[in-house]
Image (cartoon, rainbow, N blue to C red):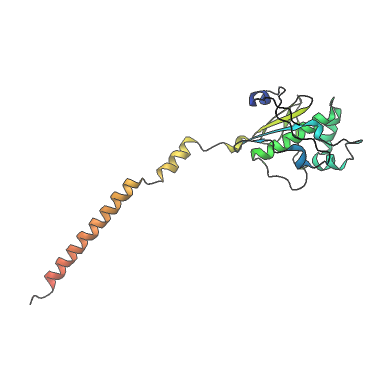
């Protein structure tokens, strides 16, 4: 079963609550199964929305195999201080997946522990080179990552690239000029040979 609702990128970037289609609940603790495909955009922007209940339960998050594979000790310490620990963990995991989808880092082979989210003095999530926004509704967690380094080419770069492309009409004219020069050269060479060779 999935709950369907709408979310907006604006609400995510402002840190407001947002909901979207939920992913199926998995008790296996498999990161790939828990997060589902999420939402991915063009390079530079990554979105992830996940069901908070999909995360496995744990008696001690700091000792649990799943949480140790996907979160650093500082992330675990931060999350267990939050009013709802699983919501904090799922928000962080969504942020890590959004960072991957933005293209800022490659998909990790084993867990997401090497993608560490820190927090500034005002409690805002931080990752080097990225702008992050986390949100949750109590049942769903969402994250957006904007990676500015993936900006498209500037107008000057596009103009330079277009200058290197020779239009078809110019190519045809150039070919005709070269053929004309070859014909003229052939005629001139024939005339020189005709002049130099003795006539019978």
What residue appears at the point 44 percent right and 41 percent down from the top-left corner?
A: 160
Who is closer to the viewer here, 150 or 175?
175
Who is closer to the viewer here, 44 or 196?
44
Q: Position of residue 128 (x, y in %)?
A: 69, 36
Image height of 64 relative to 17, above or below: below
Q: Position of residue 190 (x, y in %)?
A: 17, 67
Place residue 189 in its image quadrant. Answer: bottom left
Q: Quadrant of the C terminus?
A: bottom left
Q: Position of residue 18 (x, y in %)?
A: 71, 24
The answer to whether residue 112 of the structure is visible from this angle is: no
What residue appears at the point 64 percent right and 38 percent down from the top-left corner?
A: 102
166 sits left or right of 32 in the view: left
Q: Quadrant of the N terminus?
A: top right
- Number of numbered discs on residues: 0
35 sits left or right of 188 in the view: right
What residue appears at the point 35 percent right and 47 percent down from the top-left corner?
A: 168
Which residue ends up furthest to the right in the rendered image? 59
Q: Position of residue 173 (x, y in %)?
A: 28, 49
């Amino acid at each position: 079963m999935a709950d369907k609702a709408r979310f907006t990128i604006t609400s995510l970037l402002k840190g407001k609550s947002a909901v979207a289609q939920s992913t199926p609940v998995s008790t296996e603790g498999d990161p790939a199964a828990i997060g589902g495909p999420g939402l991915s955009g063009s390079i530079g922007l990554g979105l992830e929305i996940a069901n908070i209940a999909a995360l496995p339960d744990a008696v001690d998050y700091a000792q649990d195999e799943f949480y140790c594979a996907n979160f650093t000790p500082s992330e675990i310490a931060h999350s267990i201080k939050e009013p709802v620990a699983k919501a904090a963990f799922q928000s962080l995991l969504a942020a890590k997946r959004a960072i991957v989808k933005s293209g800022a880092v490659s998909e990790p082979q084993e867990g997401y522990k090497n993608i560490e989210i820190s927090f500034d003095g005002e409690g805002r999530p931080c990752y080097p080179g990225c702008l992050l926004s986390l949100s949750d509704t109590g049942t769903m967690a969402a994250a957006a990552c904007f990676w500015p380094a993936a900006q498209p080419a500037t107008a000057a770069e596009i103009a330079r690239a277009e200058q290197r492309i020779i239009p078809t009409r110019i190519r045809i004219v150039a070919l005709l000029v070269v053929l004309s020069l070859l014909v003229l050269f052939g005629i001139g060479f024939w005339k020189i040979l005709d002049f130099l060779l003795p006539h019978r």
